[in-house]
C-alpha cells in the first residue's frame, strides 16, 4: 500500500471537498493499493482550520499556509485558496519539491498561470488542476467515441456554463467579484471549465473573437471572514464596486477546422448550474449537461439510418469509474464523486511518478485561449491564440 501525505490550503467549501475526496479514494478504489493521509490543513481563519481538522480528520491545523509546505510528512500540496495566492503558494511548494494540486483558474490572469506552470515544470514536480467535469463517466465515454472516430470529422462545438450564483444583486461582494483578489470573473471562475472541455474534446483553438460585460456593478459588502458568493446582504447594507466581468462569450475557430462558440455567465437568470456542451461531426453528434450529468444524448444513425434520432444513454457501470460508486444502470453519480475520481487520478499520477492530465500544462493551454479573449475585448477583433510561456 502506497500512502501519500496530503496538505490542504484553504478550508472553505472547496478545500473540504478535496479533503473528503482524498479520504474516499481508497474506499472507492480499494484494489489500487493507494491511500491518502490528511496530514495538515490551513486557513487564515483559525476557526475554519480547526473545524476542518476535527471534522475531516487532519492530524494538524494551522493559520499559515507556509506550514503546510514545510511539513515533512506532506508529499502533495492541495491549493483551494483564493486566486491571488496561487503564484506564491505554487512557487513555494515547487521549490520544496512538493507535488501540486491547484484549483482553477490557476492564478488571477493568463500571465500568472504561465508563471505557475513554469515554476512547477522547472522544479520537476507533478501537478493536477481541478477541471473536474472531465471526470463525469459519460463525458469520458464521449471522449472515447470522438477518439475512435465514431462522430467522423468534427465540425461544430458549443460549450457554456450558465450559473445563477451571481444573479441576485443582493449577493455579497465576496472575493470572487474583486479583480485584485480573483483576477478575472466569469472568465476564470467558470469559463475555464468550458474552455478546458472544448480543448479536451475538440482540440486546440486557432483564433477567436470575444466580448465581456458586467451586469451588476455593485454588491453589498460582507462581514470580513464571513459569507461566500452564495450569501445575501440587505438593501440597506453598504455596497462596493464589482471590478471583474459577469459574462464572457466567444466565437472560435479550432485547429481541426471546426467552428464553435463558448459562453459563461454568473449572473444569468434561469439556469442553475448548466455546464454543458454540444458537438457535431460528419457522422454523428453528442450533447451533455451537468444538470443531468448521468445522461448523454448520442446521435449515431448508422448507414441505413434505421435509428435516425438522438438516443439517451443513462449512466451505469459499463462506463468508466461508475461501478466504483454505484452498481447497475440508472443509479446516478454527483459532483463530489467526480472530485473523488479526480483525486484518485492525481494519487495515481504521484504514485507512478508520471504526469497525467489535466495538469498545469492543460491549465496553460486554457490560459492561452483566455489571453486571446482578453486581447479581443480590447481590440474588438479576431485574435490568434498564441503561445504563452514565461521561459
Image (cartoon, rainbow, N blue to C red):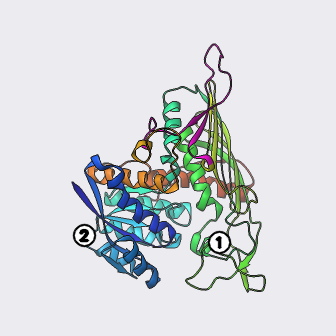
Residue drawn 64% across the image and 71% down it: 230
Against 237, is 208 above or below? above
Task: Specify the quadrant that holds the C terminus.
Answer: bottom left
- Report which quarter residue 236 is drawn in: bottom right
Tag nearer the camera, 1 or 2: 2
The residue that disc 1 covers is: 177
Q: Quadrant of residue 126?
A: bottom left
Give the percent coordinates (x, y) of residue 312: 61, 34
Q: Which residues lie in the magenta part?
A: 292-321
| Residue 228 % position (x, y) | 60, 74
For residue 210, say whether it is visible: yes
| Mark closer to the chain start, 1 or 2 | 2
- Residue situated in front as seen by the camera: 110 or 1: 1
Report helix, strand or loop for mark 2.
loop
* Residue underneath mark 2: 73
- Looking at the picture, how far across and down is residue 164, in whole percent? 69, 62
> Picture coordinates of residue 74 (x, y %)?
28, 68
**As displayed, is residue 151 above or below residue 188?**
above
Furthest toward the top, the residue is 304
Compared with residue 208, is residue 79 higher up or lower down, i.e. above or below? below
Is residue 203 shown to the viewer in this render?
A: no
| Residue at the image point whose x is 42% and y is 51% from the top | 341
Amino acid at each position: 500500500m502506497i500512502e501519500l501525505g496530503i496538505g490542504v490550503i484553504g478550508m472553505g467549501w472547496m478545500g473540504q471537498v478535496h479533503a473528503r475526496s482524498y479520504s474516499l479514494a481508497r474506499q472507492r478504489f480499494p484494489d489500487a493499493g493507494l491511500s491518502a493521509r490528511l496530514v495538515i490543513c490551513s486557513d487564515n481563519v483559525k476557526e475554519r482550520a480547526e473545524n476542518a481538522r476535527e471534522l475531516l480528520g487532519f492530524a494538524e491545523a494551522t493559520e499559515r499556509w507556509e506550514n503546510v509546505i514545510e511539513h515533512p510528512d506532506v508529499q502533495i500540496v492541495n491549493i483551494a485558496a483564493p486566486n491571488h495566492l496561487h503564484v506564491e503558494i505554487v512557487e513555494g511548494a515547487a521549490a520544496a519539491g512538493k507535488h501540486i494540486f491547484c484549483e482553477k483558474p490557476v492564478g488571477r490572469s493568463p500571465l500568472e498561470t504561465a508563471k505557475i506552470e513554469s515554476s512547477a515544470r522547472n522544479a520537476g514536480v507533478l501537478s493536477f488542476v481541478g477541471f473536474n467535469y472531465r471526470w463525469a463517466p459519460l463525458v469520458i465515454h464521449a471522449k472515447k467515441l470522438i477518439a475512435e472516430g465514431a462522430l467522423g470529422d468534427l465540425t461544430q462545438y458549443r460549450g457554456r456554463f450558465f450559473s445563477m450564483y451571481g444573479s441576485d444583486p443582493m449577493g455579497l461582494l465576496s472575493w470572487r467579484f474583486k479583480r485584485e483578489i480573483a483576477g478575472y470573473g466569469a472568465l476564470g471562475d467558470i469559463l475555464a471549465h468550458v474552455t478546458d472541455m472544448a480543448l479536451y474534446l475538440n482540440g486546440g483553438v486557432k483564433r477567436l473573437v470575444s466580448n465581456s460585460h458586467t451586469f451588476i456593478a455593485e454588491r453589498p459588502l460582507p462581514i470580513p471572514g464571513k459569507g461566500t458568493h452564495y450569501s445575501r446582504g440587505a438593501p440597506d447594507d453598504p455596497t462596493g464596486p464589482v471590478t471583474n466581468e459577469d459574462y464572457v462569450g466567444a466565437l472560435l475557430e479550432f485547429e481541426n477546422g471546426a467552428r464553435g462558440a463558448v459562453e459563461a455567465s454568473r449572473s444569468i437568470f434561469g439556469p442553475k448550474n448548466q455546464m454543458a456542451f454540444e458537438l457535431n461531426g460528419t457522422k454523428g453528434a453528442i450533447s451533455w449537461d451537468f444538470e443531468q450529468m448521468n445522461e448523454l444524448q448520442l446521435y449515431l444513425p448508422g448507414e441505413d439510418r434505421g435509428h435516425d434520432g438522438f438516443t439517451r444513454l443513462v449512466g451505469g457501470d459499463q462506463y468508466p469509474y461508475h461501478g466504483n460508486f454505484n452498481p447497475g444502470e440508472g443509479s446516478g453519480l454527483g459532483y463530489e464523486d467526480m472530485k473523488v475520481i479526480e483525486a484518485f487520478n492525481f494519487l495515481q499520477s504521484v504514485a507512478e511518478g508520471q504526469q497525467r492530465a489535466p495538469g498545469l500544462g492543460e491549465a496553460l493551454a486554457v490560459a492561452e485561449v483566455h489571453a486571446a479573449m482578453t486581447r479581443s475585448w480590447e481590440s474588438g477583433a479576431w485574435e490568434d491564440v498564441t503561445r504563452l510561456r514565461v521561459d
